[in-house]
Image: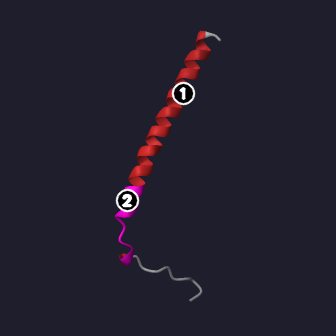
Amino acid sequence: MSTTAWIVLGVAVIAVIGYLLVMRVFFRQSRAADKEIDYSKIRPVKDDDD
């Protein structure tokens, strides 16, 4: 394989690893935010037909 192909492959692998790490952080923050929701304060959804 040529040097250019190795560079492109390396950049692609780094981009995928970075993406996965960022998504992992966002997923953990999302779960933490979901635990802080007080469902007793949420009003029930009313249908438009009523």
Residue 13, numbered label: 1
For the record, the magenta segment spans 31-40
Residue 16, placed above or below residue 44: above
Q: Residue at x 37, y 57 (%)?
A: 32
Q: How many marks are shown on the rendered structure?
A: 2
Residue under numbered circle 2 = 33
Q: Quadrant of the C terminus?
A: bottom right
**Residue 44: percent from left, percent from top:** 46, 80
Residue 1 drawn in magenta: no
Q: Which residue sits furthest right?
A: 1
Dot 2 alpha-carbon crowd within 10 angstroms: few under 14, some 14 to 19, many 20 or more: few
Q: Along the line of sight, which residue is nearer the eye, 29 or 4?
A: 29
- Inter-mark Cα distance, 1 to 2: 30 Å
Residue 22, placed above or below residue 48: above
Residue 22, placed above or below residue 30: above
**Residue 29: percent from left, percent from top:** 38, 52
Q: Along the horizontal axis of the image, is 36 left or right of 48? A: left
